[in-house]
């Protein structure tokens, strides 16, 4: 190039004039801002603008329009001009380029010129791979990415993303926004594991993976909870409930609220259930919060009568109810117009104090605990509220004299209306500053929360606590109540949740309280059963090499079908087999119930032994005085639990004979039961099936200490298949059932027809195989031998890995099953 | 001198002992239990004391025996306890056998109050042998000797029974239960329990007694939530004794009110919160 910069600029101008009026106009308009950087720079800039325009019209125009601002805010025109040329190397670059130009000033401000260039290089690399991705990258706020630590902060997020993109082809754009939030929530070290998990989920299903990376849906909740810092409520639910029950004689239902990164852990309630955040910063805060909110339920914040009186005091005849018969609070607070937050905080402050005073009477360290937690005084308008609340607690803890306000609220006859009246009195003089929604949260002491965040079911007056504490015992009734109740709100089912807090007209429930909830996820989402239903068991995750805590839930259920006729027919058909079995058993029957002779102590003298003893003595020997007889039965020492797989597959037509697989299983189980009666060993029979990890059904058919009855036979006759095979959880539960057996040698016999699988294993066979293998190992650690008898001819391929060599038996001729099942047991029993 | 010999040889005392008139065991009545017992005693009706562990059943009986001036023979039943352990057995002495009376036989002969503590724990054969003693016959058959012993006119049979503590498999037969007059025991009210504590533990101040009682009342709410046996008055007495002996409040609570009650981690943590709330705060 020999032309001078001026000539080159003129050339570009001419060229653009021909090509596009708009581009020419934009360039001319931007020119004055660029000119101070010298003719060389101007020419290069103009050429770049033209090249970009020729490459992609929108990109070029965006470049020209953004240039004056960049020149003014960023300077260093050579740098960004050269970087913009990077967008010439791939198609469809305009969107990424636009985002880059828009984001650059902030990047320079946050990172400095040098690191901003490195930041942009990464973005261009992303855009080159996938232009849309570049846009996502540049649209991400640099300040969030850097997290106050400059480029190091940026790398913290980008490096694991890059690593995962290489290793598992995880699209970084998908995970970027989530990764930033996860870092804020869990810290950088947890990021890698979170991304890896997400990559696996993404492989299992695109939609599921996307939901995960939006931090929505059950997969995300679980992954985040597993790594959540602080005192996790799910793990300590029982402890918290026990303390609450002991202190207040009340066991409220707990339900998990969604994850809300970075906000105060507030407990919300609908008057029945407490929605508890997944974690609290400390155990003390969790305890204080749970006691406090259970106190609201116990001491009448949501009592029907109190609510009616409250609305009457506010001049409203009836508390407004929504479609679910829940009281909505909006009209109450709408009285205060724009200043509603100020009143709300004061109302909560008075009511919270009233409740804490009642709790203090029962738990003398309650106020002191709350005060110990209230260490960080907020700044801004929330501070005076915080101080006021603290002053009340100081009085409760006996560290300050009572004032009229606190004394009135702590009086035994104070109720919700008292709090309302006192809050009105505090509200009117305007001595406390107005609050914004952002300030509001800080006005609450740790452990307390806004009380009217959700519409509530009014409670029957708290005198009758009996039905409340019985809820746990009456599982059926609760399930019914659950069904009519709308799902917990974190999934976004409460329409009020979506309303802007400022919008206070209308008669909805939510009034500037609570916090925005995530939108409904598009992925297929199944709500887990509420905690407390079913017995939780861990599950082994071979990918993470850890147990997933309380992952599977086992519910003990009764089989309802009975078919005694079928059982009778089967027994009659197999009578010859049973007869042979019985004879074989009798031949080697153990001696039982024999009185033990020649003992050193016992109920009575053993005459033979005594005569021997006396004779020996007379002949001058010194025999040991084993002269008593003890009538103690020999303890039966083998116990067996037969665990039958009742999954759908057993309903299949038998391949090599008439009838279905289940008919042979029935016969086998009946013969097994009768054989065991003959042997006299303690035995139990149970079945299992599963549908998702939270519904593993365990069907006890015969318990160890129950005799075989016609009822048992009828159940066996009525067996049918249902659902899937989550074997690990069933094994773990069966091991627990062994607690009933007095036997020293314990055998868990599994009768199955296929491999462990469930609806939610994501097609990963290995996952449940590995979990079953771990469950077998755990059983062995408890001294329980596990042996599997399978009807799956291909079973040898995987059973050895799960149960170990020699710990399984493949019965490939279905007709043999009834005969061979009891035989297998007898053989095992001998060998064991 | 006597004290020294006792120390060297240990004190051996016959199981049938007339009560010492001077030192009556302390008992704080909770209701009409004393009146019921005295009426039953006058008509020599067998008595069943029902109630949870450590609520004062045994102490009540000691008190009543002392009050009525009758010796008290106590047998703690266990699952290996057979009828021979109660009635007696033949022992070998040189080359001949001698019969040795069991504690029940001794009590029947001497006209003592015989107390079979936790009778359900014993084997069923031992519960059956008490049947003829509990009705109008008032006789104890000694099958092995071919004898029947007529009960002394002052003999009284008392059993204790802790409903709910046993499994369903281990319950008294209705035919056994209905032979007794039942007296129900519960943990005493807060006020009485605090008084008991102060009486049992010398030097315990009223405030601490009240706080310990509050702990127990909260802990008792956890029964059926994994706690098989709630904090008893006895464990409160232990806790108070440890505190008066100079042990730290929390440590005493741990040693007497938490550890003995449960091995369940969550439960122990919950109990610890309760103990802390009442003993440490304020």
Image (cartoon, coloured by chain):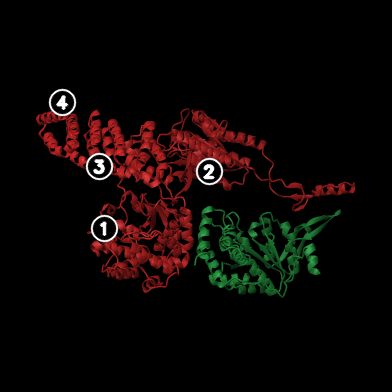
Chain colours: A red, B green
Crowding near the residue tagged with mark 3, few <14, some 14–19, many ≥20 C-alpha atoms within 10 Å: many
Q: Chain of mark 3?
A: A
The residue sitting at the right extreme is A619
- Residue beneath disc 2: A734
Q: Indicate left or right for B173 with A731 as reference.
A: right
Residue A88 at x, y percent in the picture: 23, 29
Q: Residue at x 47, y 66 (%)?
A: A362
Q: Nearer the viewer, residue A615 or A85?
A: A85
Q: Nearer the viewer, residue A104 or A713?
A: A104
Q: Residue at x 54, y 53 (%)?
A: B264
Residue A750 at x, y percent in the picture: 53, 37
Q: Nearer the viewer, residue A827 or A29?
A: A29
Q: Vertical placement of A767 versus A618: above or below?
A: above
Classify the position of the N terminus of chain A by image quarter. top left
Query: Which of the 4 image quadrants contains residue A122?
Result: top left
Whether residues under marks 3 and 1 lie with C-beta atoms below 8 angstroms apart, the answer is no
Q: Chain of mark 1?
A: A
Give the secondary structure at mark 4: loop
Q: Indicate left or right for B120 with A389 as reference.
A: right
- Residue beneath disc 1: A508
Q: Nearer the viewer, residue B226 or A190?
A: A190
**Front disc: 4 or 2:** 4
- Residue beneath disc 3: A105
Query: Which of the 4 image quadrants contains residue A163?
Result: top left
- Residue beneath disc 4: A3
- Give the CA separation, mark 3 to mark 1: 43 Å
Whether residues under marks 4 and 3 lie with C-beta atoms below 8 angstroms apart, the answer is no
Give the secondary structure at mark 2: helix
Crowding near the residue tagged with mark 1, few <14, some 14–19, many ≥20 C-alpha atoms within 10 Å: many
Q: Indicate left or right for A67 with B191 as reference.
A: left
């Amino acid at each position: 190039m020999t032309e001078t910069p001026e000539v080159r600029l003129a050339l570009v101008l001419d060229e653009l004039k021909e090509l596009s009026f708009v581009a020419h106009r934009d360039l001319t308009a931007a020119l004055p801002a660029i000119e101070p950087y010298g003719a060389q720079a101007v020419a290069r800039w103009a050429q770049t603008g033209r090249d970009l325009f020729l490459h992609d019209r929108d990109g070029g125009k965006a470049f020209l329009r953004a240039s004056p601002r960049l020149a003014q805010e960023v300077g260093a025109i050579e740098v960004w001009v050269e970087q913009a040329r990077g967008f010439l190397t791939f198609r469809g670059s305009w969107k990424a380029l636009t985002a880059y130009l828009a984001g650059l000033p902030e990047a320079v401000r946050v990172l400095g010129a040098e690191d901003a260039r490195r930041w942009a290089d990464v973005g261009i690399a992303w855009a080159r791979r996938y232009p849309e991705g570049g846009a996502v990258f540049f649209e991400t706020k640099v300040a969030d990415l850097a997290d106050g630590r400059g480029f190091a902060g940026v790398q913290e997020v980008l490096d694991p993303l890059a690593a995962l993109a290489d290793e598992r082809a995880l699209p970084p754009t998908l995970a970027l926004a989530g990764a930033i939030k996860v870092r804020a929530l869990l810290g950088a070290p947890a990021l890698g594991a979170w991304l890896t998990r997400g990559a696996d989920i993404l492989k299992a299903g695109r939609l599921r993976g996307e939901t995960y990376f939006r931090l929505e849906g059950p997969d995300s909740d679980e992954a985040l909870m597993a790594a959540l810092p602080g005192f996790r409520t799910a793990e300590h639910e029982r402890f918290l409930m026990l303390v609450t029950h002991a202190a207040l004689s009340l066991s409220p239902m707990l339900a998990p609220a969604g994850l809300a990164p970075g906000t105060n852990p507030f407990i919300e309630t609908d008057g029945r259930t407490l929605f508890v955040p997944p974690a609290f910063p400390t155990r003390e805060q969790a305890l204080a919060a749970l006691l406090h909110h259970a106190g609201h339920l116990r001491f009448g914040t949501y009592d029907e009568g109190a609510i009616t009186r409250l609305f009457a005091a506010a001049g409203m005849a009836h508390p407004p109810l929504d479609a679910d018969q829940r009281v909505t609070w909006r009209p109450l607070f709408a009285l205060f117009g724009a200043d509603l937050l100020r009143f709300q905080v004061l109302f909560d402050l008075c009511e919270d104090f009233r409740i804490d005073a009642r709790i203090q009477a029962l738990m003398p360290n309650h106020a002191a605990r709350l005060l110990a937690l209230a260490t960080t005084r907020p700044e801004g308008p929330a501070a005076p509220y915080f101080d006021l609340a603290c002053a009340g607690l100081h009085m409760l803890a006996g560290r300050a004299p009572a004032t009229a306000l606190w004394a009135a609220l702590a009086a035994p006859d104070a109720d919700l209306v008292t709090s309302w009246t006192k809050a009105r009195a505090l509200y009117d003089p305007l001595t406390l500053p107005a609050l914004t929604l952002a300030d509001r949260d800080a006005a609450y002491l740790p452990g307390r929360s806004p009380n009217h965040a959700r519409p509530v079911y009014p409670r029957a007056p708290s005198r009758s606590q009996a039905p409340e504490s019985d809820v746990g015992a009456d599982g059926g009734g609760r399930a019914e109540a659950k069904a009519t109740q709308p799902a917990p709100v974190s999934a976004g089912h409460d329409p009020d949740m979506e309303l802007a807090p400022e919008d206070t007209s209308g008669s909805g429930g939510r009034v500037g309280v609570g916090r925005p909830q995530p939108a409904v996820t598009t992925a297929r989402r199944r709500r887990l059963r509420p905690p407390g239903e079913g017995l939780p068991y861990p599950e082994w995750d071979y990918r993470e090499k850890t147990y997933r805590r309380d992952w599977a839930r086992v519910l003990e259920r009764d089989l309802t079908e009975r078919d005694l006729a079928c059982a009778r027919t089967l027994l009659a058909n197999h009578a010859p087999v049973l007869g042979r079995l019985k004879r074989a058993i009798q031949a080697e029957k153990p001696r039982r119930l024999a009185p033990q002779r020649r003992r050193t102590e016992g109920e009575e003298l053993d005459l033979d032994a005594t005569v021997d003893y006396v004779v020996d003595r007379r002949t001058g020997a010194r025999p040991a005085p084993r002269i008593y007889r003890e009538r103690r039965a020999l303890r039966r020492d083998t116990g067996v639990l037969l665990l039958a797989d009742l999954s759908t597959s057993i309903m299949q037509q038998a391949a090599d004979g008439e009838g279905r697989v289940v008919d042979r299983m029935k016969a086998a189980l009946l013969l097994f039961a009768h054989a065991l009666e003959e042997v006299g060993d303690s035995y139990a029979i149970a079945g299992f099936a599963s549908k998702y990890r939270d519904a593993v059904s365990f069907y006890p058919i015969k318990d160890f200490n129950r005799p075989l009855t016609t009822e048992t036979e009828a159940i066996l006759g009525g067996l049918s298949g249902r659902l899937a095979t989550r074997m690990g959880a069933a094994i773990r539960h069966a091991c627990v059932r062994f607690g009933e057996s007095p036997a020293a040698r314990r055998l868990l016999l599994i009768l199955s027809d296929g491999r462990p699988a469930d609806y939610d294993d994501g097609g990963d066979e290995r996952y449940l195989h590995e979990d079953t293998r771990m469950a077998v190992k755990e059983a062995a650690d408890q001294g329980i031998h596990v042996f599997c008898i399978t009807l799956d001819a291909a079973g040898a391929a995987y059973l050895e890995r799960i149960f170990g060599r020699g710990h399984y038996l493949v019965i490939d001729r279905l007709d043999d099953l009834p005969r061979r099942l009891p035989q297998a047991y007898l053989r095992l029993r001998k060998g064991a | 001198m006597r004290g020294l010999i006792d120390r060297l040889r240990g004190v051996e005392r016959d199981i049938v002992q007339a009560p010492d008139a001077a030192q009556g065991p302390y008992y704080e009545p909770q209701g009409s239990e004393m009146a019921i017992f005295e009426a039953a005693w006058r008509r020599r009706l067998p008595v069943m004391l029902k109630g949870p562990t450590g609520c004062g059943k045994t102490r009540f009986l000691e008190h009543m025996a002392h009050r009525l001036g009758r010796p008290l023979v106590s047998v703690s039943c266990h699952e290996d306890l057979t009828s021979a352990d109660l009635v007696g057995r033949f022992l070998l002495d040189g080359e001949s056998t001698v019969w040795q009376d069991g504690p029940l036989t001794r009590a029947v002969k001497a006209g003592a109050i015989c107390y079979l503590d936790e009778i359900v724990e014993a084997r069923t054969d031992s519960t059956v042998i008490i049947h003829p003693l509990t009705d109008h016959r008032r006789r104890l058959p000694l099958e092995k000797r071919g004898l029947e012993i007529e009960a002394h006119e002052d003999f009284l049979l008392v059993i204790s029974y802790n409903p709910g503590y046993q499994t369903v498999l281990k319950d008294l037969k209705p035919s056994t239960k209905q032979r007794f007059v039942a007296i129900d025991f519960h943990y005493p009210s807060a006020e009485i329990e605090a008084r008991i504590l102060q009486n049992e533990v010398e030097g315990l101040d009223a405030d601490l007694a009240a706080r310990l009682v509050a702990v127990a009342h909260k802990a008792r709410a956890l029964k059926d939530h994994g706690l098989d046996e709630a904090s008893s008055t006895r464990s409160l007495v232990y806790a108070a004794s440890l505190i008066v002996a100079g042990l730290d409040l929390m440590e005493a609570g741990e040693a007497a009110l938490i550890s003995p009650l449960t091995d369940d981690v969550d439960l122990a943590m919950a109990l610890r919160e309760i103990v802390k709330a009442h003993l440490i705060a304020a």
